[in-house]
Image: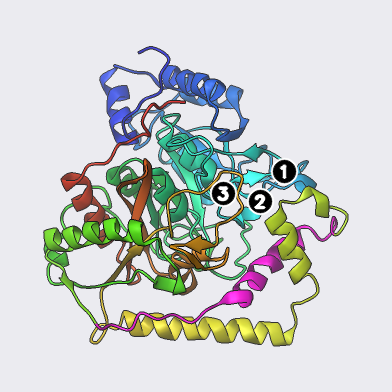
Amino acid sequence: MGNTPWQGDACSLVDEFRAGRRSPAEELQAMYDAIEASDLNAFCFLDREQAEASARNADITKPFGGVPIGVKELDAVTGWPDSHASVPLQHQIAGHTATYVERVRDLGGAVLAGQTNASEFGGVNVTRTVIHGTTHNPWQHGKTPGGSSGGTAAAVAGGICTLGTGGDGGGSIRIPAGFTGLVGLKATIGRIPRGPWAAYGNLTVTVGCLSRSVRDTARWFDVCNGFDARDPLSLPRVEGWETGLGSHLEALRGKRVAFAPTWGNATVSPYMWELLEVAGVELAAETGMQRVEGIDVAMPRMGAAWSLSGNIAIEAQLKDHWPQCADDLTPEIRFGMELAVGKYDAAARAKIERRRMEVNEAMARIFDPVDGVDFVITATNPDIAFDADGPLPGVFGGIDAGPGNNGRLTFPANLHGNPAISIPAGTLDGLPIGLQVVGRHYTEELLLDLALTAERNRPWPLVAPGSPH
């Protein structure tokens, strides 16, 4: 098989294992060789001894039996570093394994090969930290793969591994997927349980994966979804994600869809939106959906209230280190701490809750079963990938939108808990662009069939040109 990792999707890799044409142990070694040769800086920790033992004993009858995967740095694995990508916490070791990582390992049969880089505390849309340096986009070195799941995106799109874990608290699965040409599904909140010992915080975080294909994502959710008592907000198990692919196409016919280039008060590159609108129109036509005009898709701004609500958890994690650790933090996290420390009081709490209620009301109006739409089509990111070292761009199409612009397209689905998917939709200036489709709660399987339609009619490269790097 040589020393090149599998360049197809994870499902086809499992088929190779079962046919005896490849072995989990050889695949893991090829992955490690690729990591050593790579200039992407996608991984920050490798558990070679444990992974090699798991690969030797892999049960290839399981859904991901023997497939080596990357685990996002913010997902706990017993005995692995638990630094949250932050220098002050670099000596912490995880005392437990995240529920969904445990499921993909034990029920799915995947091999946990190592940790992929993430942005510090998952708080920035670029994967560049003091502790681990800068992660690069495999489509163009020097550009970012996004964040916070940037290391996973770089590894999967860069031909190093077929799958990896990701979390999405404000776009951290969809943003990297859009920047690197991958499938990124942010599920309805609670679809895959968090924990154990997971803090709810501002109730926006969902977990999942970044993948090369729709069927990989469907199989991932087959393995990982379902209630767990340690996360009492998690949802009951749903069966048949992979086997049900393509069976919901008739249900899509006649669905109402709004196109929203300024979704979430974002400013989007007009050049990119031209391409995305064409892709969206084609997808609507292929599935028989009805584009509707005149739907008010305006959203209230969360602004500083959102930033403060996210920084509260970071303040708690750094309580024994701040302010002495200020120079060890990435600029964005340091700035957030300076703005947030000591600012959370009854008035701030009331403002956060009021803004969230406003968002809930707006989303309920937009997705009203009678007067609203079934789906919103928008961009995943405001533009193509920006510089890997940042800063976060604030100018799009000649308009100063501010650095927070990069997450505005993805925030609404997190705040209201909706499922949303980033679908590869071509390239601009040699870099991928992502079409984001947002649906009502519990409609992930419809979103997957929309993505499947796009995948069948306009196949995308499974890895970046020239991969593995």
Q: In screen coordinates, is 281 left or right of 192?
A: left
Give the image location of residue 187, x and y in percent: 40, 60
Disc 1 to disc 2, C-alpha distance = 9 Å
Q: In screen coordinates, is 120 left or right of 259?
A: right
- Residues 25 and 168: in front is 168
Task: Establish if 126 lies above or below 364.
Answer: above
Amino acid type assigned to the residue bearing label 2 in the image: Glu
Tags 1 and 3 touching, CB below 8 Å: no
- In the image, the segment drawn in magenta is 294-322
Q: In screen coordinates, is 198 left or right of 364?
A: right
Q: Nearer the viewer, mark 2 or mark 3?
A: 2
Residue at 38% across / 18% down in the picture?
Answer: 23
Q: Secondary structure at mark 3?
A: loop
Give the image location of residue 183, x and y in percent: 35, 48
Q: Which mark is residue 98?
A: 3
Q: Read off the residue under disc 1.
A: 130
Q: Nearer the viewer, mark 1 or mark 2?
A: 1
Label 1 or label 2, whichever comes before in sequence order = 2
Tags 1 and 2 touching, CB below 8 Å: yes
Which residue sits furthest right? 324
Q: In screen coordinates, is 84 left or right of 55?
A: right
Asked whether residue 170 appears in the rendered view, the answer is no
Reply yes or no: does residue 117 show up in magenta: no
